[in-house]
Image (cartoon, rainbow, N blue to C red):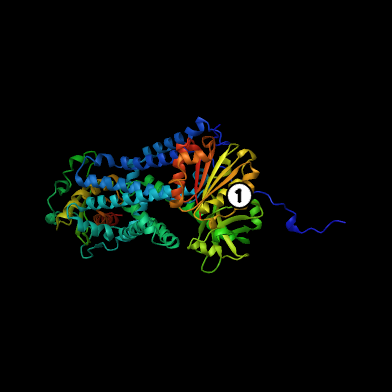
């Protein structure tokens, strides 16, 4: 007599396969940027940009306006490509680095745009003066009204991304303002083709420029917006909700389509609860357990913002996921020994890391928390550390109450972990802690390429 | 024992250099294609896109076009060595030595636009090609107009002769002039076809 089986027990729980590695090399990225720069400078030079520099003041300003405009466009295109989150770049560099470069390029672009505006006005100002030139360039010349509006939008986006303003608005407000950059860039494109000295006279250059922008637009639509739509179309469900120490909650998300999903410990996802009033809020969270076909676990702490809603989520709720992202995964460790350092909510990715380590890794886990009550996943940590032949140190207390001024100074680290220089160091936590660990571990003799950091994604 | 990133075997030198070499070659090839003199004149797309905007430019309806020839209109000419009004037929300019200007000399209607009017005198060969263009009248009420037009008009004249049509591209900052200029020229061309 065969026993009755239920379908859910037929497939055993298995760890997910790790994401495929990117084939992109640093040299490839350099080649693309270099070639684009070559073409941009070539456009400028072949259309008389260089010879104009020896001409009248108006010629010089016209030439500089053309060059700054072209470079601003290039910075904009590269900056947009970075945040399409295309896997071949993300797997190579990690989303946080891509975001940093994106912000850097955005700032460079804003400076170039301002330089472009100033030089253009100077080029037009001869001989009737700046005011007439401004009037011409904000509306009288074809498409310049549209371009002016677009420029204002782009500068608003850039300014709201500056640290001062970014800290004073919510993520969602900032994100919706940020969407305006698509409108701004679209508006500004028209004047490049119609008024740009490099494009209005040269058919080949014009079609190249149009093709480049259309290509970038398609890449964004497919890569970025396509990812968003696919995530909305196949949401996961909250399988279980479990209260952890310190008011943290661990959620497990599960769904049938996880079986073909690839992810590794240490990675993070953007989660979006599909509920009225919540669907537009999209926030990053790190995996806090090895990802398996049974589900993805996230440990979320109420930090008084969008994370609060997730700590109150009910089992059965639908959650759209985008990801996984992040390059700080256990394959960095290989067969070597490892030192894992977690601060606050950074413990999530460290727990998931521990689960996927090889038995030879002899992990040492340093766990830094502000208060005893905030220490989460302790039993799990102890069990996992012991299973891999390692040990766990928990350091609790506000900085002023500690015996040493810097718990991650080189001598303190070496006292706890004498063989630090032989270990791969993985740190997850707040920015300031990550910096302190990187400094201390370097001084303690760990090579820079063996120190890996993931910022705590909530 | 220091562990390095394990499964990332070092890519071959060819793999590292090839993309850069290919892309650089493509970039250089592309740049060398640019600024092709034949390409400079063909701006059909640009022309069509802006042609719709030419509506504000009005040709004086009272003036019967074309007037053949019309030397008396030259009284409004502003002084500019680049825009000398040519004496009729017998004296081709030195720069046009290669082409025999042995056909009609036609004055255009005045194209009026917000800064004033532009009137051209177009010289044809016997085979009906444009061999010379002179500007009989252009806006010269203020120094800005004079400056813009003195910069742009010689370019437009040269472009018209090279293209043998009104399909010429605009000079930055002289778009209004371009609209009026091409409208005036097109009126002459239309009147002869």
A379 on left or right of A278: right
Residue lying at the far top of the rendered structure: B13
Picture quadrant of residue B68: bottom left
Picture quadrant of residue A44: top left
B131 on left or right of A10: left
**Image quadrant where one finds the N terminus of chain A:** bottom right
Q: Which residue is mark 1?
A: A381
Q: Circle 1 sits in a helix, a strand or a loop, which is it?
A: helix
Q: Nearer the viewer, residue A233 or A175?
A: A175
Picture quadrant of residue A176: bottom left
Q: Nearer the viewer, residue B96 or A1?
A: A1
Residue B11 lies, with reference to residue B52, above or below; the image says above
Residue B178 spot, x, y in % from top left: 26, 54
Q: Nearer the viewer, residue B157 or A234?
A: A234
Residue A227 spot, x, y in % from top left: 54, 55
Residue B17 spot, x, y in % from top left: 47, 33
B19 on left or right of A354: left
Residue B36 spot, x, y in % from top left: 34, 40
> Residue shown at 20%/60% (left/top)?
B115
Q: Nearer the viewer, residue A1 or B186?
A: A1
Residue A347 lies, with reference to residue A414, above or below; the image says below
Query: Does the rendering let one see residue A277?
Result: yes
Query: Does the rendering let one see residue B105?
Result: no
- Callout 1: 10 Å neighbours few (<14), some, many (20+)? many
The chain letter for the residue carrying disc 1 is: A
Instruction: Please tell me how many numbered marks the rendered image carries.
Output: 1
A5 on left or right of B177: right
Residue lying at the far bottom of the rendered structure: A276
């Amino acid at each position: 007599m065969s026993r009755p089986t239920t379908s859910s027990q037929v497939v055993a729980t298995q760890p997910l396969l790790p994401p495929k590695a990117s084939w992109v090399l640093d040299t490839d990225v350099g080649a693309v940027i270099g070639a684009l720069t070559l073409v941009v400078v070539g456009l400028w030079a072949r259309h008389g940009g260089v010879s104009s520099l020896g001409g009248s003041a108006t010629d010089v300003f016209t030439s500089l306006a053309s060059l700054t405009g072209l470079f601003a466009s290039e910075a904009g295109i590269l900056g947009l490509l970075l945040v399409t989150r295309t896997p071949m770049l993300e797997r190579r560099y990690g989303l946080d680095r891509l975001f940093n470069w994106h912000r850097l390029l955005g700032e460079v672009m804003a400076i170039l745009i301002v330089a472009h505006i100033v030089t253009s006005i100077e080029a037009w100002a001869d001989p009737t003066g700046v005011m007439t030139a401004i009037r011409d360039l904000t509306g009288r010349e074809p498409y310049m009204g549209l371009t002016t509006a677009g420029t204002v939008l782009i500068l608003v986006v850039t300014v709201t991304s500056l640290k001062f303003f970014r800290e004073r608005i919510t993520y969602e407000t900032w994100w919706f303002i940020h969407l305006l950059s698509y409108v701004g860039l679209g508006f500004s494109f028209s004047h490049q083709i119609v008024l740009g000295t490099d494009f209005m006279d040269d058919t080949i250059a014009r079609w190249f420029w149009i093709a480049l922008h259309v290509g970038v637009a398609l890449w964004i639509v497919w890569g970025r917006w396509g990812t968003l739509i696919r995530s909305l179309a196949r949401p996961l469900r909250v399988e279980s909700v479990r209260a952890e120490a310190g008011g943290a909650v661990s959620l497990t998300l599960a769904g049938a389509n996880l079986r073909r999903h690839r992810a590794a410990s240490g990675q993070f996802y953007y989660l979006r609860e599909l509920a009225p009033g919540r669907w537009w809020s999209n926030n990053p969270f790190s995996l806090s357990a090895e990802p398996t076909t049974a589900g993805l676990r996230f440990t979320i702490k109420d930090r008084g913002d969008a994370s609060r809603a997730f700590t109150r989520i009910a089992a059965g709720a639908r959650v759209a996921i985008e990801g996984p992202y992040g390059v700080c995964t256990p394959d960095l460790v290989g067969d070597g020994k490892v030192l894992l350092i977690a601060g606050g909510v950074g413990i999530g990715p460290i727990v998931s890391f521990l689960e996927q380590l090889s038995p030879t890794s002899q992990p040492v886990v340093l766990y830094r928390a502000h208060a005893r009550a905030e220490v989460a996943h302790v039993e799990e940590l102890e069990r996992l550390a012991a299973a891999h032949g390692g040990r766990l140190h928990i350091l609790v207390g506000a900085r002023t109450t500690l015996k040493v001024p810097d718990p991650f100074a080189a001598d303190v680290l070496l006292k706890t972990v004498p063989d630090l220089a032989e270990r791969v160091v993985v740190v997850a936590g707040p920015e300031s802690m990550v910096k302190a660990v990187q400094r201390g571990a370097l001084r303690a003799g760990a090579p820079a390429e063996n120190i890996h950091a993931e910022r705590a994604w909530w | 024992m220091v562990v390095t990133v394990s499964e990332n075997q070092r890519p071959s030198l060819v793999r590292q250099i090839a993309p850069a070499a290919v892309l650089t070659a493509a970039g250089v090839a592309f740049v060398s294609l640019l600024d092709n003199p034949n390409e400079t004149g063909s701006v059909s797309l640009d022309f069509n896109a802006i042609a719709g905007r030419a509506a504000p430019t009005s040709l004086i309806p009272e003036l019967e076009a074309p007037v053949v020839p019309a030397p008396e209109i030259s009284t409004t000419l502003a002084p500019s060595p680049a825009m000398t009004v040519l004496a009729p037929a017998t004296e081709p300019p030195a720069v046009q030595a290669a082409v025999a200007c042995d056909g009609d000399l036609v004055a255009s209607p005045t194209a009026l636009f917000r800064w004033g009017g532009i009137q051209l005198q177009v010289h044809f060969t016997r085979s009906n090609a444009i061999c010379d263009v002179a500007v009989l009248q252009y806006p010269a009420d203020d120094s800005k107009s004079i400056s813009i037009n003195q910069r742009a008009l010689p370019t437009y004249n040269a472009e018209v002769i090279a293209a043998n049509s009104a399909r010429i591209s605009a000079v930055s900052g002289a778009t209004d002039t371009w609209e009026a200029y091409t409208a005036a020229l097109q009126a002459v061309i239309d009147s002869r076809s």
